[in-house]
Structure formats: structure tokens, C-alpha cells
Image: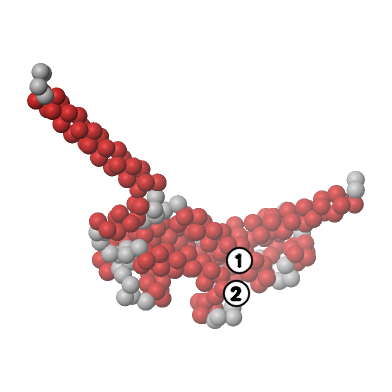
């Protein structure tokens, strides 16, 4: 086998082993508090020796950081992908709320792995990961304001803190109450948050905003084409009627 082939195979084995360790750690961190999970337990779940884990991650802290970073990366990608499929701002916000609170309850120990204060430290890893994630929400709000669907007199940071803060508080309350992974609690939190947004943040849809939203979609294009076709049919019908009348009035008829 060529040397490059051997190198590729070794690299694949290394990447596969590292991936197995990360997945095993993530699965255990999803079920137990981080402090309660040992490196030995992670190694056994990954099917490797405990010493092998330290070849890839110099400490448990390094492994936790890698798991959290991978989790936030997936969380952000899923949020962005979901938003791209939705045009309506209200539905986008509802999707983001459901996405966040569901993942928060399912993966509570991963999301709460960093101390709360680290989110406010601009130089910290948690701050960077969180800012990248909530940027999806920020873009939805900015676009909603531009489209006239969101009030423009409420600071973005206030909306962001209200949105995520209320969901995280609801999730923590649910977990502390012993209702672990109870999706009903998440749905209730989302409904309550959306009710508040609809009363104070999301603008009622006027004919103008509805037309603006529709005009940027295939549905809007189709609707306009159908409208043109209807008008042409109406003109043709009226023209035909007029011709018929003229024919009846013509001499010799």
C-alpha cells in the first residue's frame, strides 16, 4: 500500500477514535452532571483505555470544552437551517423557541456545563459560542424589523435576553421540579413566550406586510400570475360579450 494510503488510514483511525470519545462523553454528559462523569466511564463507553482518552484530550476540562463546542456547533447549524426554510417571522421565532427549549431539556448538563458568569466574559469560549448561536435570532429580528413584522423601538438585546432568558428559566424550573425531559413543559413555555411576543413585539399583519412577505416567495409569484390570468379571462369574456352585442346590432343580422 502506498505511504499516502497508510497515512490516510492512520488518520481515519485517529479521527474515528476521537469521534467515538466525543460521542461517548456527550451521551454521558446529556444524562449526568459533568462532575459526576469520570474519564474512565467515558473510555469504557468509547471502547478504549482510559489512557487513550488523555492522548486526545489532555484533561477532562479540555474534553468538556470540545463536547460543548461540538454541541453548540450543531445547535447553531440546526437553528440556521430551520430558519432558512421559514419566511414568516412569527413562525421563525416559534421554531427557534421550540428548538432551544427542547435541546435545553434534552441536553441540560451540556448547556449548563459552563458557569453562568462565563457567558458574560467577552474573552471566554462560552461567550463566543453563545454569541454565534444567538446571532441566528438576531438576524431573524433584524429582518423582521425590515419587513415591518417586528417593532423597531425595542432594543435587540432586550428581545434576545427576554427570549432566551425566559426559556432557560422555564427549563431550569422544570428540571428542578423533577420533571426531567418533559416536553410538555417546553411547549407550555414556548406558548407563553409567543403570547407575550404577539402582544408586545410582533406587529399585526396588515395587507401591506402580507403582500411583502408573499411577494418574496414562489407562493406570491404564483398568486400574482393567477391574478393576471383571472384578469385576462375577465377581459376576454367582456370582449366576447361586446362583440356578440355588436354582431346582433349590425344591419342584416
Disc 2 + disc 1, Cβ < 8 Å: yes
The quadrant of the rendering that contains the N terminus is top right
Residue indicated by mark 1? 69
Q: Earlier in the sequence, mark 2 or mark 1?
A: 1
Q: Quadrant of residue 227?
A: top left
Residue at the image point whose x is 56% and y is 70% from the top: 129
Q: What's the CA distance linking mark 2 and mark 1?
A: 9 Å
Front residue (pair 4, 9)? 4
Q: Quadrant of residue 10?
A: bottom right
Q: Secondary structure at mark 1?
A: helix
Whether residue 215 is visible, yes or no, is yes
Question: Left or right: where does residue 232 sit relative to residue 216?
Answer: left
Question: Left or right: where does residue 171 sit relative to residue 48?
Answer: left
The quadrant of the rendering that contains the C terminus is top left
- The vertical placement of 179 against 117, above or below, is above
Question: Left or right: where does residue 190 sit relative to residue 6?
Answer: left
Front residue (pair 213, 122)? 213
The location of residue 176, given as percent across then percent down, is 42, 67
Crowdedness of circle 1 by 10 Å Cα count: few (<14), some, many (20+)?
A: some
The location of residue 143, given as percent across then percent down, is 40, 64
Residue at the image point whose x is 34% and y is 55% from the top: 213
Residue at the image point whose x is 48% and y is 64% from the top: 136
Q: Residue furthest top?
A: 252
Front residue (pair 69, 41)? 69
Crowdedness of circle 2 by 10 Å Cα count: few (<14), some, many (20+)?
A: some
Whether residue 168 is visible, yes or no, is no
Residue indicated by mark 2? 125
The location of residue 243, given as percent across then percent down, is 17, 28
Question: Left or right: where does residue 77 sit relative to residue 63?
Answer: left
Q: Quadrant of residue 38?
A: bottom right
Amino acid at each position: 500500500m502506498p505511504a499516502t494510503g497508510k497515512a490516510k488510514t492512520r488518520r481515519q483511525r485517529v479521527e474515528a477514535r476521537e469521534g467515538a470519545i466525543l460521542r461517548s462523553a456527550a451521551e454521558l454528559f446529556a444524562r449526568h452532571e459533568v462532575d459526576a462523569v469520570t474519564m474512565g466511564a467515558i473510555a469504557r463507553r468509547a471502547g478504549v483505555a482510559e489512557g487513550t482518552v488523555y492522548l486526545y484530550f489532555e484533561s477532562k476540562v479540555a474534553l468538556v470544552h470540545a463536547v460543548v463546542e461540538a454541541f453548540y456547533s450543531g445547535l447553531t447549524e440546526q437553528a440556521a437551517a430551520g430558519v432558512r426554510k421559514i419566511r414568516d417571522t412569527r413562525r421563525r421565532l416559534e421554531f427557534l423557541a421550540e428548538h432551544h427549549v427542547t435541546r435545553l431539556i434534552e441536553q441540560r448538563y451540556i448547556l449548563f456545563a459552563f458557569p453562568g458568569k462565563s457567558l458574560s466574559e467577552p474573552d471566554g469560549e462560552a461567550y463566543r459560542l453563545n454569541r454565534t448561536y444567538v446571532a441566528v435570532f438576531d438576524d431573524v429580528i433584524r429582518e423582521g424589523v425590515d419587513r415591518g413584522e417586528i417593532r423597531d423601538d425595542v432594543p435587540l438585546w432586550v428581545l434576545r435576553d427576554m427570549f432566551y432568558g425566559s426559556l432557560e428559566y422555564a427549563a431550569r424550573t422544570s428540571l428542578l421540579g423533577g420533571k426531567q425531559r418533559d416536553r410538555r413543559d417546553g411547549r407550555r413555555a414556548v406558548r407563553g413566550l409567543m403570547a407575550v411576543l404577539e402582544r408586545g413585539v410582533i406587529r399585526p399583519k396588515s395587507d401591506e406586510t402580507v403582500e411583502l412577505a408573499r411577494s418574496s416567495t414562489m407562493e406570491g409569484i404564483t398568486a400574482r400570475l393567477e391574478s393576471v390570468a383571472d384578469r385576462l379571462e375577465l377581459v376576454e369574456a367582456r370582449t366576447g360579450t361586446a362583440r356578440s352585442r355588436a354582431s346582433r346590432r349590425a344591419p342584416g343580422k
